[in-house]
Image (cartoon, helix red, strand yellow):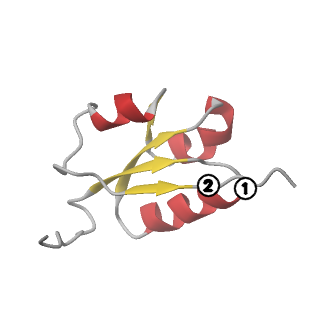
């Protein structure tokens, strides 16, 4: 399997989970020049990223079919802990 190089300014990422950890991780990646489409159960948790230019998808499936720049977008999934 060939590894595709991710270039800032050219690569759009998909991000699932914009809670306590995911929001800051995604914001850091966006600050490096990557554009993002984010998916979260509640849109209000994603609002800080939307204010920075991210697009919102209601579901990961919508995110995938939403015109990503990559054939296979990079997904980061924030794990939640029930503790």
Q: CA distance from mark 2 to mark 1?
A: 6 Å
Q: Residue at x 44, y 31 (%)?
A: 57
Residue 32 location, x and y as percent?
40, 70
Q: Which labelled disc corresponds to residue 61?
A: none
Q: Quadrant of the N terminus?
A: bottom left
Quick one: label 1, few (<14), some, or many (20+) residues within 10 Å?
Answer: few
Q: Of residues 71 and 54, which is closer to you in this image? A: 71
Q: Quadrant of residue 61?
A: top left
Residue 8 location, x and y as percent?
28, 67
Q: Tell me the SS state at disc 2.
A: helix
Q: Residue at x 58, y 47 (%)?
A: 17
Q: Is residue 37 above or below residue 31?
A: above
Q: Is residue 59 above or below residue 55?
A: above
Residue 12 location, x and y as percent?
29, 53
- Horizontal arrangement in the rendering, residue 45 relative to residue 12 (left or right): right
Q: Quadrant of the C terminus?
A: bottom right
Q: Of residues 35 and 73, which is closer to you in this image? A: 73
Residues tagged 2 and 1 counted as in contact (Cβ below 8 A): yes
Residue 40 location, x and y as percent?
58, 37
Q: Residue at x 19, y 51 (%)?
A: 70
Query: How many labels sit on residues?
Result: 2
Residue at the spot of label 1: 20
Q: Tell me the SS state at disc 1.
A: helix
- Horizontal arrangement in the rendering, residue 74 relative to residue 11 (left or right): right
- Horizontal arrangement in the rendering, residue 49 relative to residue 55 (left or right): right
Q: Which labelled disc corresponds to residue 23?
A: 2
């Amino acid at each position: 399997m060939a590894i595709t190089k991710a270039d800032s300014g050219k690569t759009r990422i998909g991000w699932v989970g914009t809670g306590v950890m995911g929001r800051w991780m995604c914001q850091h990646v966006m600050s490096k020049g990557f554009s993002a489409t984010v998916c979260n159960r509640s849109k209000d948790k994603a609002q800080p990223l939307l204010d920075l230019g991210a697009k919102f998808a209601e579901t990961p499936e919508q995110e995938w079919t939403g015109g990503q720049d990559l054939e296979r977008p990079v997904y980061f999934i924030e794990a939640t802990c029930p503790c």
